[in-house]
Image (cartoon, rainbow, N blue to C red):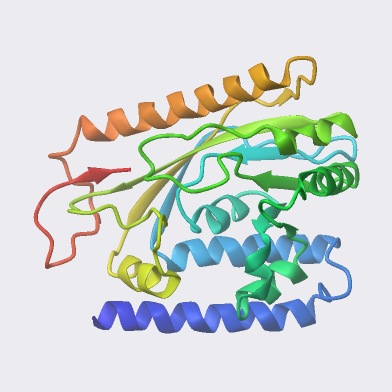
């Protein structure tokens, strides 16, 4: 309980600092500057550390070249995915429109260049054009083509609508596979699915000293608009294969606990990989 309260206090102060940084960096007026981009990446990386996430990177993180941003697409397990990937690369996110109205978090998202989409409203075409505009301006973008979160053991079907941003500009896409591992846990605390409440999910997460996140950046490739459905399906299969590989690798060592692994006192000595 003491650990949870301390972690929660540190995280709350960090969020307030984020609001102050919005003003100090001028991101409320111009969120395209190098200072804003670097500050946002630092703030997200710090958020990940405060959540007790130890990050392992596989593959090469691509960077914008010749003034062109990169489109990152990833499997989606939790809201944690956002600070996790955002702390590794300077990019902008695509989020559901409701987030804009969240206290504090909505202001942080809006002030740092997040794109918002209204689900089920036929908004995909407008957002596709906005993604293309961001990429043309040298701003990388991340979205989750599953459209929802999963339990982390599987990767759902990728939806292809937003890949149609490639109708407006040439796009290089980098698939990303996220996998979370926690030594000695009865229940997977990371996925944020179904009717989960944010505050309750966060409070439970803060019980753990260390959760390992493996982030694999798969090879960069151009979006193939000639056979878009086949291309998107191939991306999904590649990400799913990577996630399955990480899951199998950790499951093969469920009786081995890493030094410093998180073991809440009220949990049995088991291991979970998700």
The correct choice, above or below, for 44 with respect to 230 in the image is below
Where residue 74 appears, as percent x and y from the top left, is 57, 39
Residue 25, image quadrant: bottom right
Residue projecting furthest to the left = 268
Q: Is residue 11 left or right of residue 171?
A: left
Where residue 40 appears, as percent x and y from the top left, is 69, 64
Where residue 31 appears, as percent x and y from the top left, is 83, 66
The correct choice, above or below, for 20 with respect to 80 in the image is below
The correct choice, above or below, for 241 with respect to 216 in the image is above
Q: Is residue 194 left or right of residue 4?
A: right
Which quarter of the rendered picture does the N terminus lie within? bottom left
Is there any visible trace of residue 204 in the rendered image?
yes
Residue 45, image quadrant: bottom right
Is there any visible trace of residue 169 in the rendered image?
no
Which quarter of the rendered picture does the C terminus lie within? top left
Residue at image point 51% right, 22% down: 237
Where residue 48 appears, as percent x and y from the top left, is 49, 61
The correct choice, above or below, for 25 with respect to 211 in the image is below
Q: Return the residue nearer the eye: 188 or 48.
A: 188
Q: Is residue 3 left or right of residue 103?
A: left
> How many numbered marks, from 0 up?
0
Residue at image point 61% right, 32% down: 175
Residue at image point 60% right, 84% down: 16
Residue 32, image quadrant: bottom right
């Amino acid at each position: 309980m003491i650990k949870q309260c301390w972690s929660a206090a540190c995280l709350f102060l960090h969020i307030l600092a984020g609001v102050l940084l919005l003003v100090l960096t001028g991101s409320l007026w111009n969120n395209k500057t190098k200072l804003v981009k670097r500050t946002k990446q630092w703030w997200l990386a710090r958020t990940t550390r405060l959540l007790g996430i130890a990050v392992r990177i596989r593959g090469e993180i691509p960077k914008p070249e010749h003034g062109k941003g990169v489109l990152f697409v990833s499997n989606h397990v939790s809201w944690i995915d956002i600070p996790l990937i955002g702390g590794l690369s300077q990019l902008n996110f695509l989020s559901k429109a409701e987030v804009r109205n969240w206290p504090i978090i909505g202001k942080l998202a809006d002030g740092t260049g997040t794109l918002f989409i209204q689900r089920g409203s036929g908004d995909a075409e407008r957002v596709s054009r906005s993604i293309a505009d961001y990429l043309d301006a040298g701003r990388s973008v991340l979205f989750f083509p599953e459209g929802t979160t999963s339990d982390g053991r599987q990767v759902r079907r990728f939806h292809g609508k937003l890949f149609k941003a490639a109708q407006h500009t040439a796009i290089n896409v980098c698939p990303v596979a996220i996998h979370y591992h926690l030594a000695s846990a009865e229940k997977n605390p990371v996925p944020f699915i179904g009717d989960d409440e944010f505050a309750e999910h966060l409070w439970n997460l803060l019980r753990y000293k260390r959760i390992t996140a493996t982030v694999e950046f798969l090879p960069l490739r151009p979006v193939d608009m000639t056979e878009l459905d086949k291309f998107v399906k191939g991306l999904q299969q590649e990400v799913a294969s990577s996630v399955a590989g990480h899951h199998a690798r950790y499951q093969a060592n469920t009786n081995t606990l890493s030094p410093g692994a998180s073991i809440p006192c009220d949990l049995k000595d088991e291991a979970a990989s998700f």
